[in-house]
Amino acid sequence: MEEIDLSKIFNTLWRRKADIIIIILAFLMIGIIYTMKFVTPLYSSSATMVLVSSNSSDNTITTNDITLNSKLVSTYNKLIKSRNVLKEVISNLKLDIKEEELRKNITVSSLSNTELIEITVKNTNNRVSADITNEIAKVFKEKVKEMYNIDNIEIISKAEVEYEPCNINHKKDIIMFVFAGILVAAIYIIIVNSLDTTIKSSEMVEKEFDLPVLASIPMIVNQEKKDKQTGGKE
């Protein structure tokens, strides 16, 4: 089994240090430009609703209410993104957006084993995102009353304006590009080193061919170049 020569690896990396630095810096700049200029910031706002007792005269929740609410959770999740709800939301807020486009930016989730429903909306405008979320919750609650003739929806947490984008993490993106640069630099060094078959020292001859070096010819600097370097001084 061939032993790994760490000194050889280090020497190879040291000889190519300029290439490695250039590649990593190039990926760093690409990462900075990408995350700053090419990623459209999206703002996420969420509102939470809970299914409560449908009996307006009694605030206590019975076993029947829990069973009914559990069955209605999946139905309500579909209803929130239905055409009737979204069409009214667009009309109320006077949004210049199509129903299908709005639907793609809406996420409805229900917490496991609970009657909690969370509505999340993403938009390039943080205030619009919050407004749409709250309007969906409001319209949905009204639609449930109309369609099922029950009042079992309570909005327990309204959406607030978020000031940090949900899809941008500058540090994370830049670090990922730097690691990509390191990986590319490593692949580049491996390829270049494998294609480089030149003999760089007498030690390489002894190691590669298992033969002793009897003599070596030193490199002679051209006299004209030497004069230029020394300024003609001996």
Image (tube, rainbow, N blue to C red):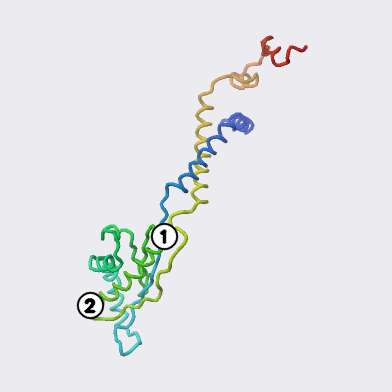
The disc at residue 146 is: 2
Q: Where is residue 113 in the image (x, y as percent from the top left)?
A: 37, 73
Q: Is residue 34 left or right of residue 131?
A: right
Q: Quadrant of residue 14?
A: top right
SS type, badge 2? helix
The disc at residue 43 is: 1
Q: Quadrant of residue 34?
A: top left
Residue for point 30% across, 60% down: 102
The answer, for residue 214, to whether it is visible in the render is: no
Residue for point 29% across, 83% down: 54
Q: Position of residue 187 (x, y in %)?
A: 50, 34
Q: In this view, does 17 lie to the left or right of 57?
A: right
Q: Where is residue 226 in the image (x, y as percent from the top left)?
A: 70, 13
Residue for point 48% across, 41% down: 30
Identify which amino acid the numbered label 2 is placed on.
Answer: Glu
| Label located before the other in sequence (2 or 1) | 1
Q: How crowded is mark 1: few (under 14 residues within 10 Å), some or many (20 or more)?
A: many
Identify which amino acid the numbered label 1 is placed on.
Answer: Tyr
**How much space separates mark 2 and mark 1, taking CA atoms?**
32 Å
Q: Is residue 10 left or right of residue 176?
A: right
Position of the C terminus, as image quadrant, is top right
